[in-house]
Image (cartoon, grey):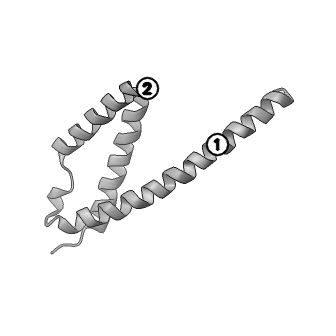
Amino acid sequence: MSPDKEKKLNKLRVKLDKIDDILLKNFKTRTEIVKKVLLLKEYKNQIVDKKRIRIILNRIKKKSVTLNIDPYVTNHIWKNIIKSYIDFERRNFKKK
């Protein structure tokens, strides 16, 4: 890679790192909200809401198309986010 391209690459990576920092802050906020949602659930079988998941994924797909983002990428990301938070809820569910 040429020195010029290397410099451009490094600048872009710095931008990506800044976006990652923002995403992490947003995930912290999201996690705090998920904790509050979990407190409202009385039974473990309430953790997975397939209807809600479909609504979320459809909304993300529509917004992705509108914003000209590859819907395959955003769908994959959101499925992983949902899966991760389902796992988080299962690990943190307190029987009442």
In this rendering, the label closer to the viewer, 1 or 2:
1
Q: Quick one: SS at disc 2?
A: loop
Q: Amino acid at mark 1?
A: Lys
User: Which residue in the structure is indicated by mark 1?
Assistant: 15
Residue 47 falls in image quadrant? bottom left
Question: How far across and down, in percent of the image, does residue 1 sit?
Answer: 81, 27
The residue closer to the viewer here, 28 or 77, is 28
Q: How many residues crowd around disc 1 within 10 Å: few (fewer than 14), some, or many (20 or more)?
A: few
In the depicted structure, whether residue 87 falls above or below residue 11: below
The residue closer to the viewer here, 46 or 30, is 30
Left or right of 19, for residue 14: right
Tell me what residue is drawn at x 17 percent, y 64 percent.
41
**Spatial CA span between label 1 and label 2:** 20 Å
Q: Amino acid at mark 2?
A: Asp
Which mark identifies residue 78? none
Left or right of 63, for residue 37: left
Which mark identifies residue 70? 2
| Outermost residue to the bottom | 96
User: Which quadrant is home to the C terminus?
Assistant: bottom left
In the depicted structure, whether residue 56 falls above or below residue 44: above
Residue 93 falls in image quadrant? bottom left
